[in-house]
Amino acid sequence: MNLANLKITMRLGLLGGFFCLALLLVGLNGWHALSQANGRSETGMQQAATLTDAIDTARSAQVEFKDQIQAWKNILVRGGKADEYEKYLKEFKRAADKTHAELLRVNALLAKLSLATPLVDDAIKMHEQLAGVFLPALRLYDAADPASVQLVDAEVRGKDRPTAAKIDETVLYMEEQTRLLMAALSAQNRAAHTSATLQLLVELLLTVLLGGAIVLWLARGIIGPLNEAVAIAQVVADGDLSKDIAVNRKDEIGTLLAALKHMHDSLAGIVGQVRGGTDAIALASAEIAQGNQDLSARTEAQASALEETASSMEQLTAAVRQTSENASQASVLAGGASAVALRGGADVAEVIATMDSINEASKKIVDIIAVIDGIAFQTNILALNAAVEAARAGEQGRGFAVVASEVRNLAQRSAAAAKEIKELISHSVERVEAGGKLVARAGATMDEVVSSVQRVTGIIGEIAVASGEQNAGISQVNQAIAEMDNATQQNAALVEQAAAAAASMQQQAAVLHDAVSVFKIDANHAAPAVAAPRGHTQAAATRPASRLAAPRRAPASSAGDDWETF
C-alpha cells in the first residue's frame, strides 16, 4: 500500500486502534494478574480462617479442661449432699466430653491444613487416660467422712498437669503456625506484586516505544508533504506565480496541493487582468485627496471645540477642588465629634467605677450581716448556758450574772454592726446620687455630639453647592461636545463625497483587488496594459465635480462601505 494514497484520517485511525489494542492487552494482563492475586488471597484467607478456627477450638478445649478440673474440685469441696454431688459429677463428665470432642476437631482441622502434629494425639491420649484415673478415685470418696476427701485428692493430685501442659503446648504450636502462614502469604503476595509490576512496566514500555515509532512514522509521512505545501504557499506569498505546482498524492495533502494549484492559476489570471487598471486608480486618488483637504478643515473646527471643552474641564476641576476642601473640613469636624464621644466614654467609665464602689459596699454589708448572724448565734448559746447555770445554782445567781454580762456585750456588738450597716447604706445612696449626676453630664456630652453633627450637615450643604457648580461645568462640556458633533457631521458629509469618488474609481477598477505589481506571472496569464488617452484623463478629472451631490442622497452606511472597500 502506498502511504501517499492513504488518508490521514485512516492513518490516525490505525494509530488509535493500535493504542486501543495495546491498552486492551495491558488491561487484560492486569486483570489476569489481579484474578491470580485474588485467588491467592482467597486461599490464604481460607487457610487463615481454618487455622484461626483451630486455635479457637484449642483454646476452648483449654477452658473446658479447666472447667473439668474445677468440677472435680467442686465434687470434693461441695459434694456433701447427694444432689450437689450429682450436679458436679455431671459437670465433670460434660466438660471431659467437650474437651475430648474439641481436641478431636482440632486434630481434624490441622490435618485439613496439612499441619498435623503428634502433640494433639498425645493430648487426646493423655486426656483419655486422665478420665480412667479420676473416676475410679471417686470410689474412695465418702461424703460423711472428711478424711476421704484428702485420700481422693492425694490419689489424683498433679495428674491433670501433664494433660494441661500438652494442651497449652498445642495452642502455642498452632499460634506459631499461624504466624508462619501469615509470613508466607505476605511473602507470596509481595513476590506476585513485584512480578505483576515488572510485567506491567515492560508492557507499558513496549507500548510506548512501539507507539512512538508508529507516531514518528506517521508524522514523517504527514509533516514532510505539509512542509512542501507550506513552501509552495510561501513562494506564492512572495509573488512568484511563474512556477507550476505538481500534484502526485491522493490523500488530504494532495487535496490541499490541488487547491493551492487552483488558487495559483486563478491568482495569476487575476493579476494579469488587474495590471491594466492602475492609471484609473491614480485619477480617482486625486479626487480623494481634494476631499481629504476639506476633511482637514473640519478637523480644525473640531480642535477649536476641544479647546472650549478643555476650558470647561478647568472650571470643573476648580469645583472639584472646592468640594475636596469642604470634605477636609467635614473630616476635621468629624474628628471633633469623635473627641466628644471619647469624653462621653470617660464619663461612662466613671459611672462604672461608682457602681463598682457600690458593689464593694454591698459586699461589706454582707460581711457585717454575717457577723451579726454569728453574734446572734453566740447569744443563743450564752442564753442557753445562762438557763443551765440558773437551774443548777438555784439561789446562787453569780454564774447567771456572768452569762448575762456576756449577753449584753454581744448585744452591744450587734448594735454597732447595725449602725455600720446604716452608714454604709447611706454612703451607697450618696454614690448613687453621684452616678445620676454623671449620667446628666453624659447627656450634656451627647448634646455636644448633636451640635457637631449639625455643623457637619452645613458642610454637606456647601458640598451640594459645589456639586451645582460642577453641574454647570458639565453643561459647558456638553455644549462643546455639541459643537464637536456638528463638525463631525460635516466631516461625515465630506466622507460621503470621498466615498463617491471611491465609487467612481471602483467602476473603473472593478478587476483590481490588490496591488499586484510584485507578482511574477508567465506569458500565458499576462494581459496588455491599458494606456488611457490624455483627453480621457482630463474628463475623468472633472467627473467627480458633477457627482458631489450624489452622496447626499445615498445612505451613510453605503458611503462607509465604499470607503472600507477602497
Image (tube, rainbow, N blue to C red):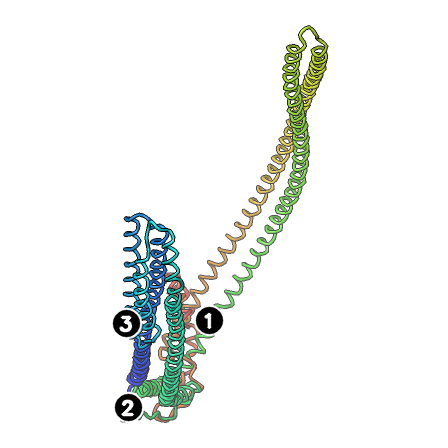
Instruction: State the image quarter where residue 256 is shown.
Output: bottom left
Q: Residue, x 60% and y 35% (percent of image)? A: 457
Lower position in the chain sequence, tag 3 or tag 2? 2
The residue closer to the viewer here, 417 or 5, is 417
Q: Which label belongs to residue 108? A: 3
Select label 1 or label 2 by which is in front: 2
Reading the image, the residue beneath label 1 is 288
Q: Decide: is 18 above or below 121.
A: below
Measured in 3D between alpha carbons, the distance from the residue under mark 3 to the one under mark 2, in whole angstroms, is 75 Å
Residue extending furthest top?
395
Q: Decide: is 101 above or below 316.
A: below
x, y (%) of residue 174? Answer: 37, 71
Measured in 3D between alpha carbons, the distance from the residue under mark 3 to the one under mark 1, in whole angstroms, is 115 Å
The amino acid type of the residue labelled 2 equals Asn
x, y (%) of residue 502? Answer: 41, 71
The amino acid type of the residue labelled 1 equals Ile
Select label 3 or label 1 by which is in front: 3
The residue closer to the viewer here, 91 or 508, is 91
- Contact between marks 3 and 1 (CB within 8 A): the answer is no
Label 1: state its secondary structure: helix
Q: How many numbered tags mark residues here?
A: 3
Q: Residue, x 30% and y 49% (percent of image)? A: 84
x, y (%) of residue 207? Answer: 36, 85
Instruction: State the image quarter where residue 167 is shown.
Output: bottom left
Label 2: state its secondary structure: helix
Q: Decide: is 131 above or below 146.
A: below
Lower position in the chain sequence, tag 3 or tag 1? 3
The residue closer to the viewer here, 80 or 549, is 80
* Apparent side of residue 329 relative to residue 118 in the rendered image (left or right): right
Reading the image, the residue beneath label 2 is 5
The amino acid type of the residue labelled 3 equals Ala
